[in-house]
Structures are given as C-alpha cells and as structure tokens.
Amino acid sequence: MGLLESIGGPADLRALDEDQLAPLAQEIRELLIDRVTRNGGHLGPNLGVVELTLALHRVFDSPRDPLVWDTGHQTYVHKLLTGRVKSFETLRTPGGMSGYPSREESEHDLVENSHASTALSYADGLAHAKKLRGQEGTVVAVIGDGALTGGMSWEALNNIAADPDRPLVVVINDNGRSYAPTVGGLASHLTALRASRHYEEFLGQVKETLRGAPTVYRALHGAKKGLKDFLTPQALYEDLGLKYLGPVDGHDQRAVESVLTRARAFGSSVVVHCITEKGRGHAPAEQHVLDRFHAVRAAPAPGTKPGAATTSWTTAFGEELLAVASERPDVIALTAAMPEPTGVHLLQQDRPAQVVDVGIAEQHAATSAAGMAMGGLHPVMCVYATFLNRAYDQVVMDVGLHRLPVTFVLDRAGVTGDDGASHNGIWDLSAFRSVPGMRIAAPRDGDTLRRELREALDIDDGPTLLRFPKGALGPALPAVDRIEGAGGAPPIDVLVRTGEDVLLIAVGAMAGPCVEAARLLTEHGIGSTVVDPCWVSPVHPGLAELARGFDVVVTVEDGLRAGGIGEATATALREAGVTPPGLRVLGVPLRYLEHSTRAALLEECGLTASQIASQAMESIEARMMRSPLKGVV
C-alpha cells in the first residue's frame, strides 16, 4: 500500500516522518496526472500546490482551523489529504466527486468556492465570528496572485487590517498566473517580491563571509529592513498593519512548514508569501507557455474513434471579433484574465492595442467599459456568463443608466455541465433582461452568432448582450422563412413550418432541440412552427400576432424559468390580449444544478427534443379534453 492510501485524514499526515513527505508528494502528483487527464479538470493549479497543501495540513488542524481556498479549483490535493483518495477516481463525473470544495463531501470543505477573490472576505468573517464567540483556532485563507487582482480581495484586506489582532493567516499562492500570466500593477509588485529572494541569498552569503567579524555583520543586519524595503515593495502589507513573512519557496516542504508555524504562533493577522510553479512535476504542463495546463479535457473513452474536427462557439466568436475589430478601430475587447477561454486571444495576438486584460476584476471591467463608451469607443466585455453576475450593479447603474453602447459577450451561457453549480450560466437571461434598455441576442448557430455580433456593435444607444453555450457548434439551422418586424424591430426567423397546431419559440442554442421536436411531432400527425426571435429581449412585438393563431405555444430556453424569456413572453402575450390555452414555459428550474454533462442536465430539466415534443402533445391532449366539442363527430 502506498503512503497516500494510508492517509485517512490530516492526523495521519501529521504522524508521518519528514523523510516520507517527498515520496508522498510524488505519489500525489502521479495520481493527479493519471486521474485528471482521464476525467478532465484543473491539473496545473493542483500540481503547483502539493507541498503547500501538505504543509497546511501538517501545521494547522482542519476543520478546527478552517481552510478557505480561493479559488476552489486548487483543492484536489486537499481532498486527497482529507479522506477522499478512494473516491477521487469519480472526480467530475455524474454523482461523483466535485471539482470544487463541497460541503456535502467533507467537513473540511467549508466554502464551496469557485469564483475568485472571495476567500479573504470569508476569512475575515470567520475570524470575526471566532473572536466574538471566544473560539480557539486560526483561520487560513489561501489565495492566488491572480485572485488578488479582484477588488473584493482589497476590500477584505482593508477590513482585516482594521482588526489585525485575530489569528488569521493569509497565504498568497504566487505562481504568476491565473488562467494566463497575471497582469497589472499587483503582478509587478509580486514579481519584485519574488526577486527579493536573491537579496536573502545575498545576505546569507555575506553572513558566512563575515562570520569572523560579528560587529560588521550586525551593522549590516541592522540595515536589513531599510535595505529590503528599498529593494522590495513588501511594505504594502506592513503599512496596512499586517505582518509579512516571505517570500518562501512553496515547493520546499520544510521551509513552508517553518514559515506557517511562525505565522500561527503570532496569533494575529499575517501574510505568508509562497512562490509556487503551476504544473510543477509534469513536464508537458511546465512547458505549456499559455496556461500550464490550467484545465484539461477528459480523455476519450477507450475505443472511441476521433470525430471530424469541429469549431467551438468560442473560436467562432473570437474569429468574428478579430474580423470586425480589424475593420473598426473603435472596437475594444475587455477580458477578466481569460483571453483564451473567451476567444479574445485571437484579437490579442493580432491587434494587442484593441484588447485590455483587467485581471480577475469583472466589476472594474464593466465600469471601465462604460468609461470607454463615454470616450467614443465601442467596448466588448467578454466573460463567462456566470462571472458577469459579479458585476450586476455596474451593468445596471454604470452602463445601463447612461444608455452606453457596451456589448457584453457571455461564453458558457446556459447549462454547462461538469464544473458544477457555480459555473452553469443560467442566471443571465433573468438578471440582465431587467436592465432598462438592454437588448439581448441568443444566436442559434455560427452564422447567427457572426451576424448578431455585428448587429450588436451597430447599436449605439444602449447596452447589448450576446450569449452562447459551451462546446462545439452544431450544424447550421437556416431559416425557411422570415417574418419582418414592424417599427424597426428585427425579423423573426422561421425554422420549421409544418402546421399550426404548436408554436415552438426557441431561445438560442435550444433551436436545435426544438427543430428535432417538430420532426417528432410530425411523426404523430401534429403540425408545428418553430421560430427563433434572434433578439430575445425585449420580447419581439411580432410574437403576439404570430401566437394568435395557435392554441399551444411553448417557449424553450436553457436559462432559469423564473424571470426568464419564457415568462417575459407570456406576459407580453397577455398584455397584447393573446391567451393561448396551451401556453408552456420550459427552462431550468429555480435551483442549483449539480455537476454532470450538459446533455444529462438538459434531460433532467426536461429540455431534450423528445421531452419538448411530449410536453407539447400533453398540452394538445389537455386542450382536447377541455374542448366543448369533445365527443362530437
């Protein structure tokens, strides 16, 4: 049995001898590489925190000393050391282990944290509660240098510094990266601190040289603080009233344990600066310049034949963004530390002056975009749908209130799957259709994605939002007809017209399942019409007149039903005096979705083609049962 299999919890780890730790670290890395490349997940970040996590669990007593991770994708090693080795093979599989901390899995997972820049606020609150309740223990927050670019981190540091006499240890896991290399002034600050290790080495060499002249050495050592403050900007933390220890080599097990032990002994708020290497111990990750294998895809199932090359939604967007930005110098893309995951890297490589990476700071990005728009530019803020939630106030008050031409492009909108509850982008339609003047487009395929991006960039009297899902583009879904909108409204695309028994109103990527549902209805002798409004909010005024000729109307979206496009459409129909007796609103129920595949989650929500067809037929049957002509031949 290997060392790792003998670890049932942190107490077992603390019982190991120091000479057993290096072999244990090697076992952990081998298991990470094997399982994560098989199941998919965050490999590089976890390879980089092996020794740090070992040290944390040997020095602190979790859960008495709560460990809060920012972000939670770096907790695979933590999971292994807290009794979850046997279940690790189920990582990110339906019903298996989450890729993030999970309160259901373990008492050691306190915060289900998968959005960045929140750990210090959690830690501040936990430390405050411990102080008021007279509880013992040290609160530990582990935060990456990338997450320190977020405004919440500095708001939290401000409050931690206001009451520093609490046992709270902030561990900066500094690998110079978030998804990509960390950018901004903070990155320069931490780079200088990393360089200060050379100063420490220099001082050590001088000490050895002057060992026979203690008076000279003491004089030099007495000047240490002034010299070090001159060479490095570590005073940033000390001037806040926080003790600072480091920087320390985050892969030197003994050194990390030593500095964490010192930090714990202070009994007050301390910043510990650890230098780590993302992807450590796995040559392909170490040599990957862009993101050090931040996240890897699951390996194909055995025997699976490679399919035809496909283009992702992200790539299609990135290519069109580059094309339109090449034509329009006023188009500026903003990204929150995610140029490649959002497709912005294509523009960044070709026209870097038209890309701004703000770090993990979505709130700042939205308001900075507002300023750019005021200055005559048309900014395009590119972000995962779930992350724009963090900037809701800025979208409402800084962009929307001023009716500014800012385009928000939401990747991974709707049901995304195996990253779990926090990464399903199901809130955007409900949340942002409430912004006065916001126009929302939901492309159904690559052609409409390209067209609607350009349409959004031509709108200059208010904000626009373009949303699309994760994954590969499906086949093109051309319109068989087009209903022109009155009063300047965009046209409505008709995708299927086989009859007027059922009207299916598809939102974005749900057009494909709706077209297939129409085919299934035809097999049952039921005629249907499938339409794509293209611009889904505000509700197209032409839908009311169109729906007037149908008894059964079904709206289909992969966002929340509550407050979504379907509910808005139902309200618009009622206000227009159209009350189809068979109206159904299909979407995601108001709850957090567990990690699974997108296909499985869509089925769970009743959003597959067969389920859409079945619910339409149920409405027809119910209508027939209520008809006064029932039984009349």
Image (cartoon, helix red, strand yellow):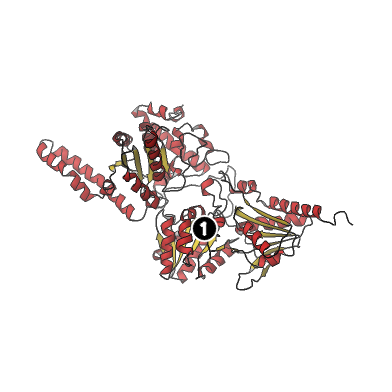
Q: Identify residue type, mark 1.
A: Leu
**Residue situated furthest right in the rendering:** 633
Secondary structure under tag 1 reads strand
- Residue 152 is situated, as x and y percent measured from the top left of the image, at 40, 50
**How many residues crowd mark 1 within 10 Å: few (<14), some (14–19), many (20+)?**
many
Give the percent coordinates (x, y) of residue 237: 29, 47
Observer-nearest residue: 299 or 181?
A: 181
Q: Residue furthest bottom?
A: 487
Horizontal relation, residue 330 to residue 413: left or right: left
Q: In this view of the protein, which residue sits in the foreground, 366 or 573?
A: 573
Residue 575 position (above or below residue 287) = below
Farthest residue to the front: give it. 132
Quadrant of the drawing holding the C terminus: bottom right
Q: Residue 363: x, y in percent?
A: 43, 56
The residue located at (62%, 73%) in the rendering is 487
Taking 105 as reference, is 626 above or below it?
A: below
Quadrant in which residue 496 is drawn: bottom right
Q: Which residue is mark 1?
A: 410
The reply to whether residue 168 is visible in this rendering is yes
Query: Would residue 268 be found to the left or right of residue 450 on screen?
Result: left
Residue 432 lies, with reference to residue 118, above or below; the image says: below
Foreground: 564 or 69? 564
Q: How many marks?
A: 1
The residue positioned 42% from the left and 59% from the top of the image is 365
Q: Can residue 349 be spotted in the picture?
A: no
The residue closer to the viewer here, 290 or 55, is 55
* Relative image position of residue 523 (x, y in whole percent): 77, 55
Q: Residue at x 52, y 49 (%)?
A: 423
Residue at horizontal 65 percent and vertical 65 percent from the top: 478
Left-right relation of 144 to 588: left
